């Protein structure tokens, strides 16, 4: 139950939360005006790790910007990689072989699961439960091993190429992925839902706390699990289908409550749905090349294109303006976390400190994604 | 018992050794236990099974500079860690470990231990206040309100026990529970009435919840809620200042477990009535401590206002009801039997 309070305090103080604080998971700073333990005003201060990705894109070739994309949201790196690659492919009119699209889908969904698992662990850690973090990391480790085999890296994957992927997947990867699906499915009910989801303390801390209405989402442009936790069934994979998603059968989890528990449940259900997607994609995986013929120096014709993908935290959009040269003329990156964070200040008003931080955890912030 | 000079010295050395060993090795037990709960190994590098880890940690903490930040209240800042540790050791004087092993048999030993526990809580308040850190002050105020809320049901429960035993001396309370587990206060089937036996387990649960809250352990670790208040009242403490707070915390757990054992679990008496030794006492307290550790690594943290609601709205009414019922059962002999 959220305690309703009247914000007419006689005396307030400013609590500087961050840039170094265990709950901000990075260098986010929030200036909290507090009345006792109640948050009167919350003001996120950004820019501590701004790296000018957009400017970097303009000063290099299309291919040179590629390794920057996974550095934005290091937890669902492949989605960002895919978003950028798709934008360039659309601008240059490159057809991607079907096998490559399937491989992209499999890997990006694996990455989504690993991102949600890490969020799960970190979120429960925010709530004071330490053990689930290590269980989640145990499973995430398996994904990292799988992806390391084919991409060569464990966190900031730069695996996709214009017109395909870096290298083909082998039988061992396929067998390993199938084994992982089986393993996670057997562990989800007991080690995640029984231990955490059904825990009375967790339910009491999340239920009816941190209401995000559909209007707030619309106002700040929130997407992803935050929006779906407010009852809007919006997912780029369904609403503006890309890659091979139209050929796969999966559901968009959606909870109308709008509280922290709803966002929690959306993400937990998405893990299940991603497992379904991977399983189907593995079954349907066609033979063939994994790379299209692409010129060494890419020079898309002058034009303007936009491409959005559903990353683990919401819609990642790439708007690419080309002038016919070998560098992008302008690249605008729309990151989901920035919009999701923006609503924090409004919603956190009047909350008690511990609830505000639990609410912040439920938004699943990745700071480099905010400060591109 | 002859009163030679050696007796107090032996007790002093013994209690200090027991306290030191527990403060150091409960940390190891906790880390090892947490490791196994979390499917990892825990400390293993220093010594066999990491058994020398507490020693290494102690050397590390002691060799560090005790940093006193600018703007803190110097005397209180330095006094608080000591104040956290001393009452916990002192209260061990009043605890009977077996029929013969007890430093001082004090008539009001229950009251003494509670008084000392309150001083321990004052250390948190002073430490938080003297740090001059906002997180530390929030933590200090939290721990005070938590302490007030949980001492009431705890003491009411203790009064129930005192009424049953007719004494405030821990030794006498334990001796009342001689015999098998059916004589213990947690389930006194052989006691005054069956009805009493039914309400006492509730009383035990209340007492146990309160002792978790009193020792600031998860899921009630409001005072050092890491993800909210960084390290709470310990935020500004480094080196042995921090070390003393940690040791004080573990000693409070030991005292809490000892108290629970004596009040509810029959002290040093074996569960089937024919043995009684310090072994049973230690076994019981370490089982309780293991439960503390198990709870901490299983549950997420609760919320401060939910914590206070739990105490004021559930634990206090229940403990008062049990107190009243006990009074009735004692007065009306053979009630419901």
Image (tube, coloured by chain):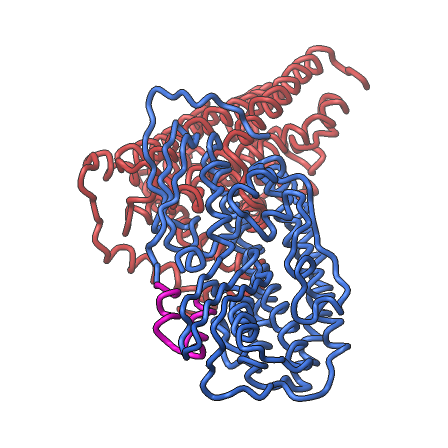
Q: Nearer the viewer, residue A292 or B94?
A: A292
**In this rendering, would B111 be left or right of A278?**
left
Chain A colour is blue
> Against B323, is A100 above or below?
below
Q: Does the magenta stretch include residue A65?
A: yes
Residue A7 can be seen in this image: yes
**In this rendering, would A327 be left or right of B263?**
left
Quadrant including the N terminus of chain B = top left
Instruction: Give the chain coloured red.
Output: B
Residue B103 can be seen in this image: no
Q: Nearer the viewer, residue B44 or A191?
A: A191
Indicate the position of residue B111 as horizontal and vertical percent values: 45, 24
Q: Which of A255 and A10 is in front in this view?
A: A255
> Against A35, is B323 above or below?
above
| Residue drawn 58% across the image and 59% down it | A312
| Residue drawn 50% across the image and 40% down it | B97
> Against B121, is B67 above or below?
below
Indicate the position of residue B48 as horizontal and vertical percent values: 45, 70
Q: Give the range drawn in magenta.
A: A52-71
**In this rendering, would A49 be left or right of A271?**
left
Q: In which quarter of the image is residue B312?
A: top right
| Residue drawn 40% across the image and 76% down it | A327
């Amino acid at each position: 139950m959220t305690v309703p309070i009247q914000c007419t305090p006689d005396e307030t103080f400013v609590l500087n939360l961050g840039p170094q604080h265990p709950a901000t998971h990075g260098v986010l700073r929030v200036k909290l005006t507090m009345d006792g333990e109640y948050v009167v005003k919350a003001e996120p201060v950004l820019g501590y790790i701004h790296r000018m990705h957009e400017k970097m894109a303009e000063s290099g070739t299309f291919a040179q910007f590629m390794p920057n994309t996974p550095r934005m949201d290091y937890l669902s790196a492949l989605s960002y990689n895919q978003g950028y690659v798709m934008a360039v492919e659309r601008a240059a009119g490159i057809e991607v072989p079907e096998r490559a699209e399937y491989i992209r889908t499999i890997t990006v969904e694996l990455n989504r699961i690993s991102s949600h698992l890490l969020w799960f662990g970190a979120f429960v850690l925010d709530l004071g439960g330490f053990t689930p973090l290590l269980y989640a990391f145990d499973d995430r480790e398996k994904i990292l091993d799988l992806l390391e085999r084919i991409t060569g890296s464990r966190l900031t994957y730069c695996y996709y190429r214009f017109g395909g992927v870096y290298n083909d997947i082998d039988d061992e990867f396929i067998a390993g992925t199938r084994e992982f699906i089986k393993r996670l499915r057997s562990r989800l009910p007991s080690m995640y839902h029984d231990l955490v989801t059904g825990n009375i303390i967790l339910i009491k801390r999340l239920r009816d706390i941190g209401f995000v209405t559909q209007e707030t989402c619309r106002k700040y442009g929130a997407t992803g699990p935050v929006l779906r936790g407010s009852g809007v069934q919006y997912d780029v994979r369904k609403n503006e289908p890309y890659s091979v998603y139209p050929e796969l059968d999966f559901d968009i989890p959606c909870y109308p409550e709008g509280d922290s528990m709803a966002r929690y449940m959306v993400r937990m259900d998405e893990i299940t749905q991603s497992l379904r997607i991977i399983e189907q994609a593995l079954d349907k995986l066609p033979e063939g090349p994994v790379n299209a013929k692409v010129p060494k120096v890419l020079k898309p014709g002058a034009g303007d294109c936009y491409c959005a993908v559903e990353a683990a935290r919401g819609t990642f959009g790439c708007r690419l303006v080309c002038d016919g040269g070998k560098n992008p003329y302008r690249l605008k990156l729309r990151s989901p976390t920035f919009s999701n964070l923006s609503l924090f200040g409004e919603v956190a008003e009047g909350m008690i400190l511990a609830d505000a931080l639990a609410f912040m955890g439920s938004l699943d912030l990745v700071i480099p994604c905010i400060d591109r | 018992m002859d009163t030679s000079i050696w007796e107090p010295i032996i007790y002093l050395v013994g209690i200090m050794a027991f306290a030191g060993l527990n403060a150091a090795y409960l940390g190891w037990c906790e880390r090892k236990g947490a490791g196994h709960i979390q499917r990892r190994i825990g400390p293993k590098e220093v010594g066999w099974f990491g058994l020398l880890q507490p020693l290494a940690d102690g050397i590390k903490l002691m060799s560090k500079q005790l940093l006193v930040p600018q703007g803190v209240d110097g005397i209180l800042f330095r006094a608080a860690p000591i104040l956290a540790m001393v009452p916990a050791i002192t209260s061990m004087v009043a605890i009977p470990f077996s029929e013969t092993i007890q430093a001082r048999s004090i008539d009001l030993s229950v009251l003494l231990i509670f008084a000392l526990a309150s001083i321990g809580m004052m250390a948190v308040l002073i430490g938080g206040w003297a740090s001059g850190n906002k997180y530390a002050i929030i933590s200090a105020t939290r721990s005070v309100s938590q302490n007030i809320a949980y001492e009431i049901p705890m003491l009411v429960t203790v009064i129930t026990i005192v009424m049953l035993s007719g004494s405030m001396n821990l030794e006498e309370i334990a001796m009342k529970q001689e015999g098998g587990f059916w004589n213990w206060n947690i389930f006194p089937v052989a006691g005054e009435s069956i009805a009493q036996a039914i309400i006492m387990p509730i009383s035990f649960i209340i007492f146990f919840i309160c002792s978790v809250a009193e020792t600031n352990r998860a899921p009630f670790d409001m005072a050092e809620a890491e993800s909210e208040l960084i390290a709470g009242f310990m935020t500004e403490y480094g080196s042995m200042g921090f070390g003393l707070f940690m040791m004080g915390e573990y000693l409070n757990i030991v005292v809490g477990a000892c108290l629970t054992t004596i009040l509810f679990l029959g002290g040093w008496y074996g569960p089937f009535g024919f043995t009684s030794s310090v072994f049973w006492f230690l076994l019981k307290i370490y089982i309780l401590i293991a439960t503390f550790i198990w709870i901490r690594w299983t549950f997420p943290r609760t919320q401060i206002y939910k914590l206070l609601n739990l105490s004021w709205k559930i634990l206090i009414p229940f403990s008062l009801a049990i107190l009243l019922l006990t009074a009735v059962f004692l007065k009306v002999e053979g009630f419901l039997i």
